[in-house]
Image: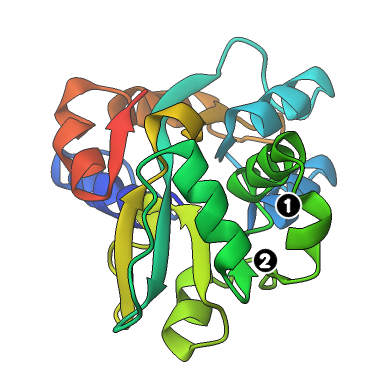
Amino acid sequence: MATRLVLAELVQAWREAGGCPVQIESIGGVDAAKRVAAGEVLDLVILAADAIDRLLADGHLLRGTRVDLVRSAVGVAVPAGAPAPDIGSAAALRAAVLAAGRIGTSTGPSGQALAQMFERWGIADQVRQRLVVPPPGVPVGTLLARGDIDLGFQQLSELIHVEGIRLLGTLPPDSAIVTVFAGAVARTSQHPAAARAVLNFMASPSATAAKRRQGMEPA
C-alpha cells in the first residue's frame, strides 16, 4: 500500500510515453505475498525487498528480474490539533512513545521494524498494551484522523496526503527506518518482456520526480 500513489503516477507516465497498458492492484503486502505464493497469474510483483527475496528464493518470481525502485522512510504523526511531541532523537522518540496513550503501527515492514526497535529499547511489553494495529490495507493515518490513536507510525508516503493529522516528520537519524521497495517478474507472467520494460522504466531517472512527490527517494 505504501507505493500505491507513486505507482499510479508512474503507470500514467509510462502510458503517456507510449508504453503498453498496465493495471496495478494495491493491497496489503502480506495478502499480496500470499497471492503470489498461491500461483495467481500476475506479471509484476512490487513489495518490500525482503518479501521479494523470499518469493524469489521460493521460485515464485523469475530469478534475475529484481529491480529496486524506491527507498521509503517511516514517518510519525499525531491527530490534527494535538500537541507535537519531540522526536528529534532516539531518546526523545522513546519518551514520546512511552507518553502516548494509544500507538498505531502497520502490519507491513515498518511495523515489524518498529516492533524490533521497541524490543531493543526494552519497552516492548509496555507498548504492546497500548498498540493498535489496523487491518491490512487500512492506513494508520485513518486511525489518527478518527482519533482512535494518539501517535502513529507508517511509511511517510502513506501519511503525507492524509487530512486530519499532524505530520511530525520522519524518524530521527539515530533510529531511522527505511524500507526498500523492489519489483520482480512473476513466474506466472504471460508477458515477461513487457513486465521487465515496465520495471526498468520505473527505476529510470525519469521517475525520480514522481517518487519524491510521494515522499520517497530513488533506490
Q: Position of residue 77 (x, y in %)?
A: 40, 64
Give the colour scheme of this rendering. rainbow
In the rendered image, the vertical position of residue 123 relative to residue 200, given as above or below? below
Along the polypeptide, which appears first: circle 2 or circle 1? 1
Which residue occupies the foreground of this view, 157 or 197?
Answer: 157
User: Residue at the spot x=50%, y=41% of the render?
Assistant: 91
In the rendered image, the vertical position of residue 55 relative to residue 102, given as above or below? above
User: Residue at the spot x=27%, y=44% of the render?
Assistant: 10
Q: Is residue 57 visible?
A: yes
Query: Which residue is disc 2 drawn over?
Result: 136
Residue 144, numbered label: none
Question: Pointer 2 and pointer 1: residues touching (CB < 8 Å)?
Answer: yes
In the picture provided, is 184 more to the left or to the right than 72?
Answer: right
In the picture provided, is 35 more to the left or to the right than 96?
Answer: right
User: Residue at the spot x=28%, y=67% of the render?
Assistant: 161
Determine the image quadrant of residue 202: top left
How packed mark 2 is, by other alpha carbons closer than 10 Å (few <14, some 14-19, many 20 or more), is some
In the picture provided, is 184 more to the left or to the right than 29?
Answer: left
